[in-house]
């Protein structure tokens, strides 16, 4: 079994600088280790934070999550047959052969795809735009992502011409195997979407880090078969024989091809696919601007409704139409990553005052 996906790429050094105000001097450090403002443990009080039970810098929702493997002594009492998440994919011990058409758990790398003409109806415009694909990586398998790789298709011809590796931790900067694996993976992925239609043969709920995804085994109209990940769903809404139409991107998990669906329709199920990550709601305690990859990003300390505090990267300032101010009530979704010993949520969506905004993290188009 492939132990780690390690889909990283050529290192382009990231330099982070910080300023207590917009005009203050910046200090060169991409890991924000020199400033106590970034230590969210300062915001825990004696009633909400138990240092003997939970690691510094982790927000606690009192529910075991995949990240707790690294940041807490909490244990998952509801894991599937006590399976250990030591690999990127696998089966529970008691899974029957008939149910091994796909794994019981896998790490999806929090994959995202984006393009310059997402809402365009013009095929000509679409062919002239750019396309990007991002995948996060947990290189030391401690339960938190520590780097990501972005693949970039300049002209949307299906070929990713460029790729860039970003490490949140200095220890990952010189990973030569990661660079080699990323270069090899670049040839195996396409930016072109796939559309499928067919009949559901079987379904299962699959553990993807700390969420449950609905996965369907589909017999397509042309007589082939494909496994389709329909994203986080509260319950299995599909049954054998149901018709399903799905659009998404083809990847490979272990030895199994998989369609990561971005859209899906069925007359028998309401399939709303949201891959932005878990929801966290709270009040903005304070914000700060930092320079990341030559862009000004907005960081926010958010005090969640259960009294915990989390650090959130809200993305590039020039992409935020309405950056939240201190005291604002917000809901964020995103991917938790490890920046040295701190946990930061890389937000993918921000909701405030009833308006939800997607946070784009794709690089600017390259000429």
Image (cartoon, rainbow, N blue to C red):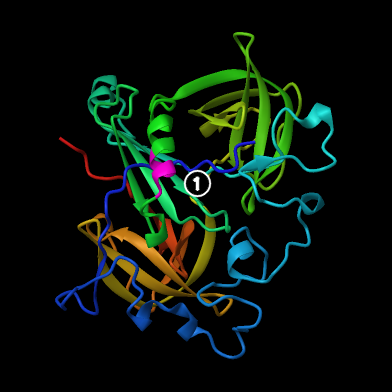
Numbered disc total: 1
Q: Quadrant of the N terminus?
A: top right
User: Which residue is at 14% across, 76% downward?
Assistant: 23
Q: Position of residue 247 (x, y in %)?
A: 50, 27
Q: Is residue 126 magenta?
A: no
Q: Is residue 177 magenta?
A: yes
Which quadrant of the figure has residue 190? top left
Q: Position of residue 18 (x, y in %)?
A: 25, 72
User: Which residue is at 39% across, 44% downward?
Assistant: 176
Location of mark 1 (residue): 110
**Can the viewer see residue 323 in this picture?**
no
Relative to residue 113, is residue 255 drawn left or right? right
Q: Position of residue 146 (x, y in %)?
A: 45, 56
Q: Nearer the viewer, residue 161 or 230?
A: 161
Quick one: SS at disc 1?
A: loop
- Which residues, given as a range, are shown in magenta? 175-179
Is the residue marked by circle 1 packed among few (<14), some (14-19), or many (20+) residues within 10 Å?
some
**Can the viewer see residue 180 in this picture?**
yes
User: Which residue is at 48% across, 43% downward?
Assistant: 6
Q: Nearer the viewer, residue 24 or 218?
A: 24
Q: Residue furthest bottom?
A: 46
């Amino acid at each position: 079994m492939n132990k780690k996906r390690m889909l990283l790429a050529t290192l382009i050094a990231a330099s982070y600088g910080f300023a207590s105000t917009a005009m203050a001097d910046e200090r060169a450090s991409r890991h924000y280790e020199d400033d106590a403002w970034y230590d969210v443990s300062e915001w825990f009080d004696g009633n909400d934070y138990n240092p003997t039970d939970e690691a510094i810098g982790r927000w606690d929702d009192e529910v075991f999550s995949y990240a707790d493997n690294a940041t807490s002594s909490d244990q998952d009492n509801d894991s599937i047959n006590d399976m250990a998440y030591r690999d990127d994919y696998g089966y529970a011990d008691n899974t029957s052969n008939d149910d091994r058409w796909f794994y019981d758990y896998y790490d999806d790398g929090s994959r995202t795809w984006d393009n310059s003409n997402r809402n365009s109806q013009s095929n000509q415009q679409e062919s002239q735009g750019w396309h990007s694909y991002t995948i996060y990586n947990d290189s030391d398998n401690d339960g938190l992502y520590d780097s990501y790789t972005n693949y970039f298709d300049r002209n949307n011809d299906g070929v990713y011409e460029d790729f860039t590796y970003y490490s949140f931790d200095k220890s990952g900067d010189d990973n030569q195997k990661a660079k080699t694996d990323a270069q090899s993976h670049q040839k195996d992925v396409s930016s072109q979407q796939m559309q499928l239609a067919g009949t559901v043969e079987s379904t299962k709920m699959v553990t993807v880090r700390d969420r449950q995804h609905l996965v369907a085994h589909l017999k397509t109209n042309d007589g082939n078969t494909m496994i389709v990940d329909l994203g986080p769903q509260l319950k299995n809404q599909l049954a054998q024989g149901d018709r399903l139409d799905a659009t998404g991107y083809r990847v490979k998990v272990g030895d199994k091809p998989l369609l990561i669906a971005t859209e899906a329709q069925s007359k028998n199920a309401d399939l709303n696919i949201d891959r932005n990550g878990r929801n966290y709601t709270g009040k903005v305690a304070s914000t700060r601007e930092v320079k990341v990859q030559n862009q000004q990003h907005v960081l926010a300390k958010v005090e969640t409704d259960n009294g915990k505090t989390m650090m959130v990267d809200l993305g590039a300032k020039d992409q935020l139409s309405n950056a939240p101010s201190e005291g604002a009530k917000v809901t964020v979704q995103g991917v938790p990553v490890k920046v040295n010993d701190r946990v930061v949520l890389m937000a993918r969506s921000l909701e405030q005052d009833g308006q939800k905004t997607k946070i784009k993290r794709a690089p600017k188009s390259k000429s």
